[in-house]
Image (cartoon, helix red, strand yellow):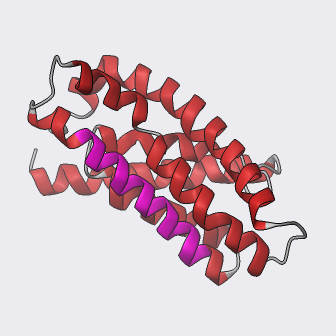
């Protein structure tokens, strides 16, 4: 398959999955409030496997925020938070894909760090959206704690479970991502 077609296809599927999973979380009241547990945030580990996940996650977050009725600054800055997290996860995985860390103890630990960039970026950016765009009552530190907890559940727990599952099938799902 043509590399560009594969890249675009993977990005589009990831964006669509992000939208659907966010919509599911929104229907359960989990996608937008002080404590957010978006199932879609588990997908933020996908840049560990393929660079196509970076634009896919950004576009998916942008569309999901638009479709769930988020305010324009939330659409913009929430999507940027996801983009920064995706780029961070991709950069963490680059030495593994190039083979420079394969088999080393450093390389083995990188997969456990994959959810860290989206956790950090969302924990630092989203609280300001909650406080200044939606005017939720509470301090920035409180929102950092609540958003951080939601991100740890979404990216850390669910994302690492997804990473473990996809690692078994990576050569079939992401043949060019390695």
Q: Quadrant of residue 172?
A: top left
Camera-nearest residue between 93 and 15: 93
Q: Quadrant of the N terminus?
A: top left
| Image side of residue 97 versus residue 109, left or right | left
Relative to residue 12, is residue 77 depicted above or below? Answer: below
Relative to residue 9, is residue 175 depicted above or below? Answer: above
Q: Quadrant of residue 135?
A: bottom right
* Residue 84 shown in magenta: yes
Q: Which range of residues does the magenta coloring cover?
A: 75-93
Q: Quadrant of residue 165?
A: top left
Q: Position of residue 171 (x, y in %)?
A: 21, 25
The answer to whether residue 78 is visible is yes
| Image side of residue 112 versus residue 133, left or right | left
| Image side of residue 94 versus residue 113, left or right | left
Q: Quadrant of the C terminus?
A: top left
Camera-nearest residue between 46 and 2: 46
Q: Position of residue 105 (x, y in %)?
A: 25, 18
Q: Position of residue 124 (x, y in %)?
A: 59, 62
């Amino acid at each position: 398959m043509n590399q560009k077609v594969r890249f675009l296809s993977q990005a589009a599927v990831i964006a669509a999955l992000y939208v659907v999973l966010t919509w599911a979380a929104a229907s359960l009241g989990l996608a937008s409030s002080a404590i957010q547990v978006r199932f879609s945030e588990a997908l933020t580990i996908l840049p560990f496997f393929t660079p196509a996940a970076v634009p896919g996650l950004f576009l998916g977050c942008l569309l999901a925020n638009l479709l769930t009725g988020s305010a324009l600054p939330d659409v913009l800055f929430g999507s940027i938070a996801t983009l920064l997290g995706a780029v961070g996860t991709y950069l963490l995985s680059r030495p593994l894909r190039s083979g420079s860390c394969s088999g080393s103890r450093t390389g083995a630990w990188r997969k456990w760090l994959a959810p860290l960039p989206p956790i950090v970026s969302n924990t630092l950016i989203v609280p300001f959206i909650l406080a200044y765009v939606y005017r939720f009552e509470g301090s920035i530190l409180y929102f950092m704690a609540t958003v951080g907890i939601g991100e740890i559940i979404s990216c850390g727990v669910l994302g690492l479970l997804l990473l473990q599952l996809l690692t078994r099938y990576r050569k079939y799902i992401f043949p060019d991502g390695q």
